[in-house]
Image (spheres, rainbow, N blue to C red):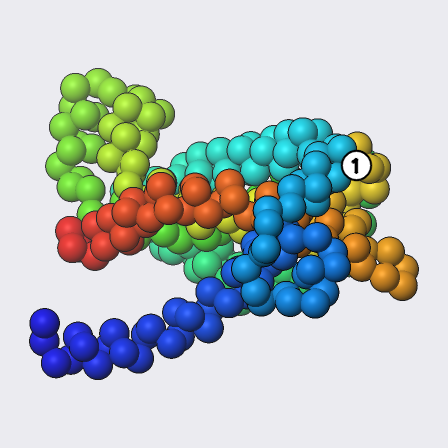
């Protein structure tokens, strides 16, 4: 092993341990009794205590909240990818001065923080009667289309234009070229986008807290938030819910991690 790699490992090891401690703290205290967790929060449990998980599945409508979260996440990501890719397609393969203006206008969306648009966005949601609707929340997350557009446009530039010209000569329509040729070639970057945006939508708290009112429409993150009362926090319930919400995302990220690197590096290598 090279000396530089040894030094890097020695530097990264304590940083990794520091980053893991909060997750260890939450996980280990979900399998302890409240008394043991209060006395020895960092110690391993003397015996496995599963009542916290039993209580969560008994008191919290997890299946309904999981479905709400899955519905919002799935359709948000699906629409982000399709609209972002469709917006990038003409700007890459039919660039002109007007398309350049449109491209700069879309990219300028990165300069506007989401928090600064909350008041007009809420008024818009009220006017469209989208408040307290799951599909309304999907509409809110459409702001992520800009991110999808930006990454898709960069990757799409690596596709040879000769391929598009050949398909046009063969009589393929514009939509046919997009759906049958362009979209399949975008698979690596689409998977990368899906991973990033899924983790954002799944774990987001601000938008569901603002635009959902009914308990039956709660997402998983809102169920964690509801573990606290006005003056106290039910810490066992809070930490157990946190673990349950994090587990799907951890598995999802570990499964898709190799595709993230492949998608981001692929465009750079081809370019």
* Residue position for label 1: 59
Name the residue at 46% across, 65% down.
Answer: 20
Q: Is residue 117 left or right of residue 109?
A: right
Where's residue 241, x and y in %? Answer: 66, 47
- The reply to whether residue 44 is visible in this rendering is yes
Q: Is 157 located above or below residue 61 in the figure? A: below
Point out the residue furthest to the front here: 46
Most distant residue in the top direction: 171
Count every numbered label the image shows and give the total. 1
- In the drawing, does residue 164 fall left or right of residue 220? left
Q: Which residue is drawn at 70% across and 41% down?
A: 51
| Relative vertical location of residue 19 with respect to residue 36 in this rendering, above or below | below
Looking at the figure, which quarter contains the N terminus? bottom left
**Which percent across, then down, holds residue 110?**
51, 62
Q: In which quarter of the image is the C terminus?
A: bottom left
| Residue at point 25%, 20% (across, down) | 172
Identify which residue is drawn at 79% across, 55% down: 234
Per the image, label 1 sits on a secondary structure element best described as: helix
Hey, which quadrant is residue 139 in on the image? Answer: top right
> Mark 1: few, some, or many residues within 10 Å (few <14, many ≥20)?
few
Task: Give the residue furthest to the left.
Answer: 2
Q: Quadrant of residue 137?
A: top right
In terms of image quadrants, where is residue 34?
A: bottom right
Residue 72, x across and y down, in percent: 61, 36
């Amino acid at each position: 092993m090279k000396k530089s790699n040894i030094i890097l490992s020695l530097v990264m090891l304590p940083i990794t341990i520091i980053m893991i401690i909060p997750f260890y703290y939450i996980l280990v205290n979900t399998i302890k009794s409240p008394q043991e967790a209060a006395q020895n929060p960092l110690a391993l449990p003397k015996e496995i205590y599963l009542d916290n998980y039993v209580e969560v599945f008994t008191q919290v409508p997890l299946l309904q909240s999981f479905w709400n979260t899955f519905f919002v996440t799935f359709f948000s990501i699906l629409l982000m990818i399709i609209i972002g890719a469709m917006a990038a397609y003409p700007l890459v393969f039919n660039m002109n001065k007007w398309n350049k203006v449109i491209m700069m206008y879309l990219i300028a969306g990165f300069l506007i923080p989401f928090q600064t648009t909350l008041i007009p966005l809420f008024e818009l949601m009220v006017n469209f009667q989208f408040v307290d609707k799951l599909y309304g929340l999907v509409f809110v997350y459409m702001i992520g289309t800009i991110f999808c557009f930006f990454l898709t446009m960069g990757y799409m530039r690596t596709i040879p234009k000769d391929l598009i010209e050949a398909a046009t000569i063969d009589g393929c329509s514009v939509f046919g070229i997009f759906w049958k040729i362009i979209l399949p070639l975008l698979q690596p970057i689409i998977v990368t986008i899906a991973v990033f945006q899924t983790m954002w939508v799944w774990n987001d708290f601000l938008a569901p807290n603002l635009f959902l009112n009914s308990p039956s429409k709660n997402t998983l993150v809102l169920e964690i938030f509801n573990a606290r009362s006005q003056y106290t926090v039910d810490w066992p319930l809070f930490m157990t819910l946190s673990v349950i919400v994090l587990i799907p995302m951890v598995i999802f990220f570990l499964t898709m991690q190799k595709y993230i690197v492949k998608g981001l590096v692929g465009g750079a290598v081809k370019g």
